[in-house]
């Protein structure tokens, strides 16, 4: 196993060989990953904290790491076809309304709560924060 920790202000993928970079298919608007974490064409590779832009970084990256551990331990079932389909749907949706920026693929900021809820459900956690649906929908 290998974990690479890096910092910086510009995305850089030269640490990967050319074959891996080609499989990653990095586009002008970013690196499109399943759940902003795993590439669909490269096995045993994940990006935690790198390809996810949320308002609360520490909670987002923590959930991302918890989700990844469940995925790689086999507790979450995700087949390649479903992952690719979901990535393509996300790509189409974001490209309809988000400005074309190099980080568009990783932006979750405006729909962060929805993403958190989904990840929490995937890892078996309760996503609702209130005791009933009226409170959930209408209270802070």
Image: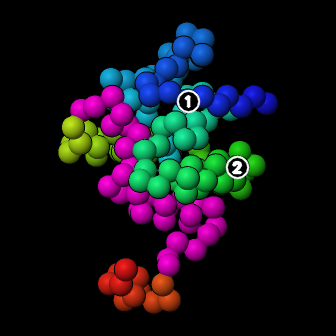
Give the quarter of the image for residue 4: top right
Measuring 54% from the left and 41% from the top, which residue is drawn there? 49
Measuring 50% from the left and 50% from the top, which residue is drawn there? 57
Q: How is the image coloured?
A: rainbow
Seen from the viewer's position, the closer of residues 131 and 32 is 131
Q: Is the C terminus in the top left, top right, bottom left or bottom right quadrant? A: bottom left
Residue 95 placement (x, y as % from top left): 25, 39
Residue 41 placement (x, y as % from top left): 55, 28
Query: Label 2 belongs to which residue?
Result: 69
Is 34 on the left or on the right of 62, as rendered? left
Q: Is residue 62 above or below residue 11?
A: below
Is 99 on the left or on the right of 15, as rendered? left
Q: Secondary structure at mark 1?
A: loop
74 part of magenta stretch: no
Q: Is residue 134 above or below residue 1?
A: below
Magenta residue span: 100-129
108 part of magenta stretch: yes
Seen from the viewer's position, the closer of residues 5 and 30 is 5
Query: Label 1 belongs to which residue?
Result: 7
Residue 135 - label: none
Residue 66 placement (x, y as % from top left): 66, 54
């Amino acid at each position: 196993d290998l974990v690479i920790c890096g910092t910086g202000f510009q995305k850089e993928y030269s640490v990967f060989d050319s074959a891996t970079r080609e499989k990653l298919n990095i586009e002008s608007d970013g690196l499109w990953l399943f759940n902003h974490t795993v590439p669909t064409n490269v096995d045993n590779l994940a990006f935690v904290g790198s390809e996810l832009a949320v308002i609360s970084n520490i909670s987002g990256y923590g959930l991302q790491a918890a989700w990844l551990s469940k995925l790689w331990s086999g507790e979450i079932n995700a087949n390649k076809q479903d992952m690719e389909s979901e990535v393509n749907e996300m790509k189409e949706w974001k490209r309809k309304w988000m400005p074309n920026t190099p980080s568009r693929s990783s932006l979750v900021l405006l729909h962060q709560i929805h993403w958190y809820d989904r990840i929490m459900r995937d890892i078996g956690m309760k996503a609702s924060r209130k005791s009933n649906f009226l409170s959930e929908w209408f209270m802070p």
